[in-house]
Image (cartoon, grey):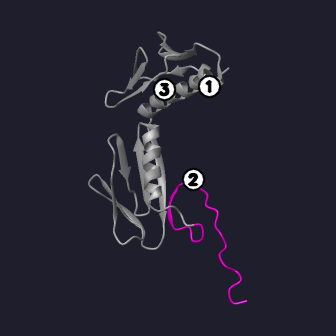
């Protein structure tokens, strides 16, 4: 039994949900997200604007999909109501980030600056030269863009230089201890 899949999803004010065949579309007037659902999972919305998911079978794959699609639809509803964000911190001498129009320009120790265009539906902000905030309604896209930015300079284990998530804990290594002995 999927405990996550059985939880109902309450649709807040200002969010509109359309369920057609195997396609669930959620919109807030400005943005719209959609998710195709496996035919073995049934999505229904009652008159109180509460979404319920049910499954056809009890085999392992269908039980897993039940919880997966419930989470994906819930993430769309929450993303369009509140939005998601990831914060990245830059650490290193001379390392900095800035926005030039819709492009993120990173100076992170390479011989050239790295430029990255924000995909549609994602906004990138730089409150300071060492902070990057990635915002959007699609949780998957926010995480993917943040991971791409982090991949430009993964934190070094010896000096902790690079781009890391705000809540990421880095394990530092000691370095050489036997030199000059």
Taking the spot 58% from the left edge, 15% from the top edge, the residue there is 55
Does the magenta portion include 152?
no
Residue under pointer 3 = 73
Residue positioned 49% across, 21% down in the render = 38
Q: Which residue is mark 2?
A: 167
CA distance separating discs 3 and 2: 26 Å
What is the number of callouts on the image?
3
Q: Which range of residues does the magenta coloring cover?
A: 157-181
The Cα atoms of the two marked residues, 2 and 1, are separated by 26 Å
Which quarter shows the C terminus? Answer: bottom right
- Residue for badge 1: 4
Distance from Cα at disc 1 to Cα at disc 3: 12 Å
Disc 2, disc 1: CB below 8 Å?
no
Q: Is residue 134 above or below residue 172?
A: above
Rendered location of residue 90, percent (x, y) = 47, 63
Does the stretch in magenta take in 169? Answer: yes
């Amino acid at each position: 039994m999927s405990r996550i899949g059985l939880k109902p999803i309450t649709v807040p004010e200002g969010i509109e949900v359309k369920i057609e065949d195997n396609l669930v579309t959620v919109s807030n007037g400005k943005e719209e997200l959609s998710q195709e659902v496996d035919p073995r999972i049934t999505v229904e919305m009652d008159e109180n604007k509460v979404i319920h998911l049910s499954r056809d079978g009890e085999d392992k794959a269908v039980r897993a999909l039940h919880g997966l699609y419930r989470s994906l639809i819930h993430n769309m509803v929450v993303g369009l109501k509140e939005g998601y964000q990831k914060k990245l911190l830059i650490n290193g001498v001379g390392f900095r980030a800035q926005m030039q129009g819709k492009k993120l320009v990173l100076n992170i120790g390479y011989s050239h600056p790295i430029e990255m265009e924000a995909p549609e539906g994602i906004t990138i902000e730089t409150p300071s030269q060492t902070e990057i905030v990635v915002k959007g309604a699609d949780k998957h896209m926010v995480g993917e863009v943040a991971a791409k930015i982090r991949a430009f300079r993964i934190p070094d284990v010896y000096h902790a230089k690079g781009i890391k998530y705000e809540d990421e804990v880095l394990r530092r290594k000691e370095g050489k201890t036997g030199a000059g002995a």
